[in-house]
Amino acid sequence: MTEGAAEQAGRLLAQLEAKGRPIESRDLFVGAIALEEGYAVLTDDLEHFERIPGVQVVEAKQLFVELDRLV
């Protein structure tokens, strides 16, 4: 984790706690790193990651459905 991602995590935690909607610290860190690095998050835990403004979330099972269509 970079210093920028750690700072991003702190800002996100403050925002989510102010809204009364905090998430697990592991998800918070993954989301912060994704934002900092410009990555999408591949997950089945949409509920937590969709709370993070700006993070692109890809649902794992939907990805596999799309991949099956291609083969």
Image (spheres, rainbow, N blue to C red):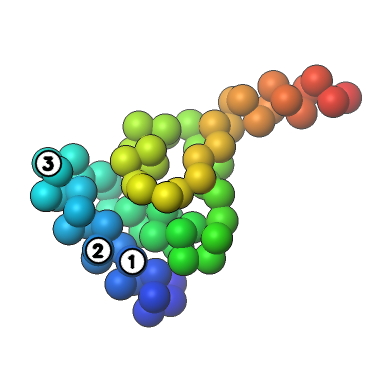
Corner quadrant of residue 23: top left
Residue occupied by mark 1: 8
CA–CA distance in space, label 2 to label 1: 5 Å
Amino acid residing under circle 2: Arg
List x then y, in percent, for residue 70.
85, 25
Q: Which tag, 1 or 3, sits closer to the chain's start?
A: 1
List x then y, in percent, for residue 7.
30, 72
Q: For the N terminus, give its image quadrant.
A: bottom left
Q: For the C terminus, give its image quadrant.
A: top right
Residue occupied by mark 3: 20
- Which residue is pictured at 59% across the width and 26% down the height? 61
Mark 3 secondary-structure assignment? loop
Residue occupied by mark 2: 11
Whether residue 64 sits left or right of residue 41 in the image: it is right
CA–CA distance in space, label 1 to label 3: 18 Å
Report crowding for label 2: few under 14, some 14 to 19, many 20 or more residues within 10 A (C-alpha): few
Q: Are marks 2 and 1 in contact (CB under 8 Å)?
A: yes
Amino acid residing under circle 1: Gln
Mark 1 secondary-structure assignment? helix
Whether residue 36 sits left or right of residue 12 in the image: it is right
